[in-house]
């Protein structure tokens, strides 16, 4: 269980992030068209998993915008923006913002991705949502970088994530 804060107040996650050097576990997440995507959909690609509570909050929206901007310059890399938001909300946000370089994936049905990766917030006002975290994966599915953002209102370290590619 990781201890993080929300506005300086302690909250906890369901576990710890996967370790660097391990393989990213397969997942089933819902795309904007309501089809299901799994890790195999991105085989052979480097991945940046930008994980956050909700795209309808300022910091989460900023992270999607910043990774969208970076993604246009990344070779053989896909940025996955993962939250428990409904796919409709994710699609609406990216459409309104003109963001086309990221892939939105929703864990809204059962939160299994968040639970499997130690990301589910288990107490406090955001209980049930995902914590803010980054997981970077190489072309073979091996994790090369993780960051559990200590204060949920803070942005992730974009430079460290991109350097891990």
Image (cartoon, rainbow, N blue to C red):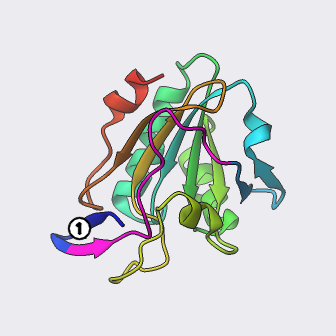
| Residue 162: image location, x then y, percent | 42, 26
The magenta stretch is 10-25
- Residue pushed farthest left? 8
Tell me: residue 114, above or below residue 77: below
At a point 40% along the width and 65% down the height, the residue shown is 57
Residue 145 found in image quarter: top left
Q: Secondary structure at mark 1?
A: strand
Report the residue marked by disc 1. 5
Q: Which of the two residues, 15 or 40, is positioned nearer the viewer here? A: 15
Q: At 50% from the left edge and 35% from the top edge, which residue is drawn?
A: 136
Question: Residue 70, percent across and down?
Answer: 47, 27
**Front residue (pair 147, 35):** 147
- In the rendered view, tell whether residue 106 sits above or below residue 70: below
Could you say where residue 41 lies in the image, as x and y percent from the top left? Answer: 79, 39
Classified by dominant secondary structure, the portion drawn in magenta counts as: loop
Say left or right for 52 vs 154.
right
Q: Is residue 137 above or below residue 163?
A: below
| Above or below: residue 25 compared with residue 151 | above
Residue drawn 61% across the image and 61% down it: 113
Give the quadrant of residue 151.
bottom left
61 left or right of 29?
Answer: left
* Residue 19 on the magenta segment: yes
Quarter containing the N terminus = bottom left
Residue 131: in magenta span: no
Please state the horizontal and vertical placement of residue 98, each as a whole percent of the image: 58, 43
Q: Residues within 10 Å of mark 1 (few under 14, many from 20)?
A: some
């Amino acid at each position: 269980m990781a201890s993080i804060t929300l506005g300086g107040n302690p909250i906890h996650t369901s576990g710890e992030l996967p370790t660097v050097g391990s393989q990213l576990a397969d997942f089933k997440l819902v795309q904007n068209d309501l089809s299901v995507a799994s890790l195999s959909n991105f085989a052979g690609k480097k991945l940046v998993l930008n994980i956050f509570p909700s795209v309808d909050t300022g910091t989460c929206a900023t992270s999607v915008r910043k990774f969208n901007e970076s993604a246009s310059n990344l070779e053989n890399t896909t940025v996955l923006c993962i939250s428990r938001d409904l796919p409709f909300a994710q699609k609406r946000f990216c459409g309104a913002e003109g963001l086309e370089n990221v892939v939105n994936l929703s864990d809204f049905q059962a939160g299994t991705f968040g639970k499997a990766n130690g990301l589910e917030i288990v107490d406090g006002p955001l209980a049930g949502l995902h914590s803010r975290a980054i997981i970077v994966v190489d072309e073979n599915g091996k994790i090369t970088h993780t960051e559990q953002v200590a204060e949920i209102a803070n942005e992730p370290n974009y430079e460290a994530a991109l350097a891990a590619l």
